Amino acid sequence: MENRFRYVDEDYDRVPGVPLDDSANSNFLRDTLIPTSDRQSIVGKSAEGETFQPTETSQNMANRLLGLGSENYQAGQYEAALDLFKQAYSLYHATQDDLGQGRSLGNIGLTFYSLKHYSKAIEYSQSALVLAHYTCDRPSAVVVLSTLGNAYRHLKDPAKAIEYQLQSLALAKEVSDRSGEMAALNNLGLAYKAVSQYEQAISYEKQSLIIARELGAQPIEEQILKNLGNACYALGDYAGAIDYYQQRLALARLLCDSRMEAQILRNLGNAYYAMEDYPRSIKCGEQRLDATRKLDDLRGKEQALGSIGVAYDALGDYLSAIRYYEQRLEIARLMNDLRVEEQVLGNLKVACFAIGDYIRAADYASQRQNLSRK
């Protein structure tokens, strides 16, 4: 699938060798690449159930199906894309087009990854990798390796994820694929973060950020800034996290992405709170509250109110904290969220007790007790 900024993972040079000059092996590749569980559903049949014949027009149709699948994938229509990629594979298989088969299988693997079917993604991507090696299709191998590494990371196998990312990085450099290099560096950062090696993660993410800016890939730059901020936060470097979140916030506003802006303000507020800079945490919370109101995001509004209340609580401004907690309680009841309601009632009990309003504190304690009995 053509995608300049698709993240990549594994390297061509370390793929186990496949014989390139044995006709028997060529037939074996065509006959055994499809996972057994899906073989009957995608080999040799069209969407209408007709058997494809290896004609010249079949290859043109396969190319069109592959392109349509890519369009559906980019639009987030993954099920439709999957069906189109499988049809394309059937036609490429009928015409014995190894290059087309490999690319179709790679796209099927990528789509399964996007659908969060990680084992399926690995199964198809491994098959695609064999064909990419067989046909010397190194650009496709970069993408396939990306899918493999990311899928293994989600399956909690960081060693394999890192191995594939390192191979991807080396291959991307070999073929002068800067976007592939950027992707591999970013994914290495994610893989190392998964094993709590935050400094290593940050080092890779910084390199990825340089390339993203070089390429003018603002959506990817935003993702990398988020990853850098989160890695710094996990490391306890809250000042570093705030710096990256602020850069991300500026980019989100440039892109006019209100939902992203609200998410970043949440992270910023948390980082300021961790630094005990409660006034700035409150300011971020207020800005987030405004954003959630514009988005008509009730859950986001509830969370923002909670964050502001907690920050006022930490400042010892219990009257302000109570005001925000009460608004949050109202929303929790509107959403019928018993867990949040119980939590807020506890916050209100403590805050009322702190200002000496024991009658209200007892009332909130009673409400919480009655709620826990439901």
Image: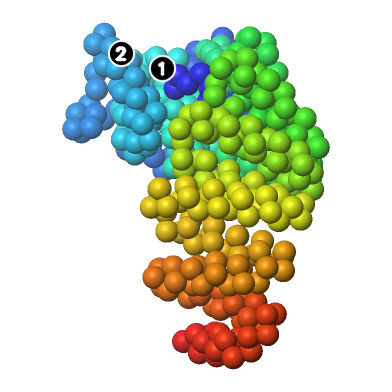
- Residue 258 in the image: state x and y as whole percent: 46, 40
> At 60% across and 34% down in the image, what residue appears?
248
The answer to the question of whether label 2 and label 1 lie on touching residues, with beta carbons closer than 8 A, is yes
The amino acid marked with disc number 1 is: Gly
- Residue 250 in the image: state x and y as whole percent: 58, 32
Residue highlighted by disc 2: 59
- Residue 141 in the image: state x and y as whole percent: 56, 20
Give the number of the disc on residue 100: 1
Q: Which of 217 and 323 is in front in this view?
A: 323
Tag 2, which secondary structure?
helix
Quarter of the image for residue 144 reads top right
Q: Left of 37 or right of it: where is 174?
A: right
> At 72% across and 23% down in the image, what residue appears?
207
In three-dimensional space, the C-alpha distance between marks 2 and 1, rounded to whole angstroms, equals 9 Å
Specify few, some or many for label 1: CA neighbours under 10 Å numbering under 14, 14-19, or 20 or more: many
> At 81% across and 37% down in the image, what residue appears?
199
Q: Left of 111 or right of it: where is 176?
A: right
- Please say whether residue 166 is visible from this viewpoint: no
